[in-house]
Amino acid sequence: MKTDARNARAAQIEAAAYALLADKGYAGLSMNGVAKAAKASMETLYRWYGDKTGLIRALIAGNTASLEDTLEVAEDADAGDALDQAGARLLTMLLGPAAVALNRAAAADASGDLGRLLAEGGREVVAPRIAALMGRAQAQGVLGPAPEAEQAEAWFALLIGDLQLRRVTGALPQPGAAFIEARSTQALARLTRLFPPARLDSGAPMA
Amino acid sequence: MKTDARNARAAQIEAAAYALLADKGYAGLSMNGVAKAAKASMETLYRWYGDKTGLIRALIAGNTASLEDTLEVAEDADAGDALDQAGARLLTMLLGPAAVALNRAAAADASGDLGRLLAEGGREVVAPRIAALMGRAQAQGVLGPAPEAEQAEAWFALLIGDLQLRRVTGALPQPGAAFIEARSTQALARLTRLFPPARLDSGAPMA
DNA sequence: CGACAACCGTAACTGTGGTTACGGATAAGT
DNA sequence: ACTTATCCGTAACCACAGTTACGGTTGTCG
């Protein structure tokens, strides 16, 4: 099988796995189910992925890739706008069905391997990008001076809070775009109140 | 069986279930395992709890009760101290093995019932208590005026961030007391910067 | 065209877990 | 003391999922 054909086939298989994972949970994701849904054979699944956790690992890797795309923000944009937009996109992704399904899978894995993998491909990819954004925000006078990692962590906490956990446990339905944008804007507003720039002329004007 | 004897027996059974849930995950929690660990019979388990999710439901109920105990703070204490202490206790509980195990169980339940139950017995119990604390903090000049629910939500987000999710997915080991106290103190400090009191004489002195 | 590797479909093997069933022991109530 | 309900211990039933195996088919390459 040619390389690109195989990649396309793998994408189909992983898409089917995502779909099953999303609406049946990790326990409801069976190799048999994936094979049937993707019209693939068990032999192929095991040859390509090794075992079930290998399949999940592949899903996590794909998720990491799309996460990096999500964080591609215009380099020259205003730092405030960039943060606002990045927050909304990040939230959309983290609260979306794929990320939720993967976190459920990691929660079900008692060994913790999947969780660590997910953190490596998620949080640890995001953190430096956010810190870089904070650096730009400081340089543009949007934020006051402070360790960038500290600002990044505060922003992230304000942005996501326990939303993702509630999504993962099923206590919260997937929020709409309006909610997400409002939340991102609120997080940024709070962050600027936490780390106000020394001179306020580039801040928000008074109403 | 006398009522209190039965309660004691039920407590033993639920403790055994917790222990199994904590170190084997939800998938590793089997009714057979619970029966053996608690030296109870299957018949008793099914007579008392109906089925496996019923057992989990009982665990959640017990967790709610102990959560309410956790939030019992001295009524007359300084609001700042009270918040600091409540934050540390809350974090200790939310990141502890019991809460983590229950959240994992909820994540594994595709129906979402357990998740909603857990939220009802957790978040929705905590929120009004915290809001009341915020009201006291405003009255004592520790915090500036603002809707209490808004302050409560911001504080909670700053306090917990994604710590609990990372615990649930296994990406984060259980933190020590020092970390938790520092985190609670930091959350409170940030909250007071977000909602500064009008007069600063009760605020933190400058270094 | 022929050989070969990869893939599909299906089924079998194996272990496990939720649930039910049953005989023997124990405590409660009359 | 007798009856009855409850509980323990164990095992059996059933379904399902992870994994392996195998014959038939398709696409690739010499």
Image: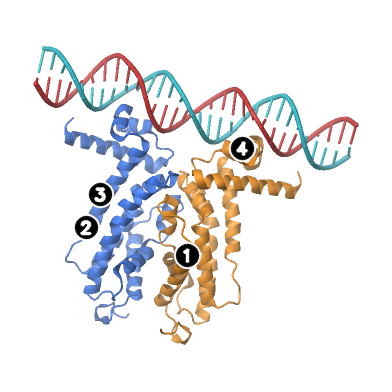
Chain colours: A orange, B blue, C red, D cyan
Residues packed near mark 2 inside 10 Å, few (<14), some (14 to 19) or many (20 plus): few
What separation in Å lies between label 4 and label 1 (alpha carbons)? 36 Å
In the rendered structure, find residue B72 and report the number of the disc placed on it. 2
From the image, state whether disc 3 or disc 4 is nearer to you. 4
Instruction: Note whether B1 is above or below B165 in the view shown.
Output: above
What separation in Å lies between label 2 and label 1 (alpha carbons)? 34 Å
- The local secondary structure at tag 2 comes to loop
From the image, state whether disc 3 or disc 1 is nearer to you. 1
Left or right side of B23 for A49: right
Contact, mark 3 vs mark 2 (Cβ under 8 Å) = no
Instruction: Note whether B139 is above or below A116 in the view shown.
Output: below
In the rendered structure, find residue B65 and report the number of the disc placed on it. 3
Residue type, mark 3 in image: Ala
Residue assigned mark 4: A36
Residue assigned mark 1: A180
Residue type, mark 2 in image: Glu
Left or right side of A76 for B198: left
Chain containing mark 4 = A
- The local secondary structure at tag 3 comes to helix
Residue type, mark 1 in image: Ile
Query: Residue A198 sits in which quadrant?
Result: bottom left
Contact, mark 4 vs mark 1 (Cβ under 8 Å) = no
Residue type, mark 4 in image: Lys
Say which quadrant the N terminus of chain B sits in: top left
Quick one: label 4 or label 1, which is nearer the N terminus?
4
Quick one: label 3 or label 2, which is nearer the N terminus?
3
Left or right side of A55 for A156: left
What separation in Å lies between label 3 and label 1 (alpha carbons)? 33 Å
Pointers 3 and 1 within a single chain? no
Chain containing mark 1 = A
Contact, mark 2 vs mark 1 (Cβ under 8 Å) = no
Q: Position of residue A161 (x, y in %)?
A: 41, 62
